[in-house]
Image: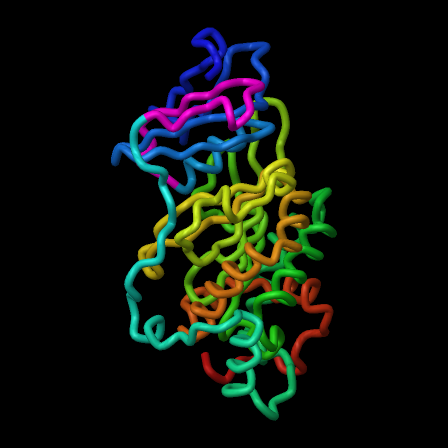
Amino acid sequence: MPGSASKFEIDVTDLRRLGPSLPVGVSRQGCYRIEFTTGERYLGRTDNIVLRVGSHRRTWDDMHSVTFWPGAEMESVSLDSGDLRIARPGPPLRKVDAETPVMDPVLDRMQWADDRLMGLPDARPAERPDQRERTRPLFERLSSHPDFTRIVSLAARYLDLFVPARATTEVANWVITSLPSTLKTRFWHRLICLSINNVEALTIGEQFDGECWTTLGFMSANPSDLHSDAILTSSLRDEGVFLAPAWYETVGPVYQVGFDGLDGLETVMECDEVLDLVGALSMRLMRRGRGLYGRFHDYNFADCILGMPPASSNRDPGD
């Protein structure tokens, strides 16, 4: 265990307004331990503790203390007392969850599409009137972001991996928004949010660490009885990927697959163990049907990630 001289306690009393801070000259790379008000603990390793604590603050509102060891490796940091916080599967919250088949997520997507969409062309739905123009200013601001092209590619990759008939299910099952203002602070804002049903499935945003802005975010995934160390490889952790146990009111326990940069998101999209957890949750949400966020959908950004032109009519007869 590192000596007390190399250990720092990070103040968590006002992270929303002030953000985490370290003494000048202290390395931001190292290992950390979070203690929650429940007595649970969480251990992690990061190249930038300021970014990581900011990510955790958006997930957890019950952090009691954060201890940081600059330059330390995981083997040198102990749990001390308390249980590890893990997103364990719980009882289904809705009937549709209880009826979800236990099968490979890829086969589940194929079966879902066969049951609901067999014989239908994978074509985009008619647009809601005036919504494209209403969302265009935010899209144009987003399109000037230096990471825009890469964000488009990664969001498209998410749809390819996890959403069946991605054009047909646009708006009805999934929605994407540009520069949503939810939980925006002077340290953090969302760039895009892809929701399935009413749950954030993929969020990419920017966080300020006191020196520069970094593009990062998370995917939502099914819970697991396994701890994150048994799911994530060391190479994924080196890329800034982490699993944060969380609770969504409408879903129950989940894992947030966090990434400290777009390199991490790109890498974790090649990990079968993580893809299975993300894919399983996405299908749980697809089975719930239409969500409530369709009026926020950005057809302009959807053009980019679908690589398809808009529907021929701009009216949605269902609205």
Along the line of sight, the residue nearer the viewer: 262 or 130 = 262
Quadrant of the rendered structure where residue 13 is?
A: top left
Q: Is residue 312 left or right of residue 298?
A: right
Q: Is residue 45 above or below residue 121?
A: above
Task: Kindly identify the residue that appears in the image at 50 percent across and 84 percent down.
Answer: 317
The reply to whether residue 205 is visible in this rendering is no
- Tell me the quadrant of the picture where the C terminus can be found: bottom left
Residue 71 painted magenta: yes
Residue 181 painted magenta: no
Residue 143, percent from left and from top: 70, 51
**Residue stretch rendered in magenta on the structure:** 60-80
The reply to whether residue 11 is visible in this rendering is yes
Q: Is residue 279 above or below residue 129?
A: above
Q: Is residue 279 left or right of residue 56?
A: right
Task: Kindly identify the residue that appears in the image at 71 percent across and 57 percent down.
Answer: 153
Task: Kindly identify the residue that appears in the image at 64 percent across and 44 percent down.
Answer: 264
Q: Is residue 194 above or below residue 44?
A: below
Task: Kindly identify the residue that appears in the image at 70 percent across and 49 percent down.
Answer: 148
> Which residue is farthest left?
38
Quadrant of the rendered structure where residue 102 is?
A: bottom left
Q: Is residue 283 left or right of residue 133?
A: left
Residue 194, percent from left and from top: 54, 59
Residue 44, percent from left and from top: 49, 32
> Which residue is farthest bottom?
119
Question: Tag count in the figure?
Answer: 0
Quadrant of the rendered structure where residue 163 is?
A: bottom right
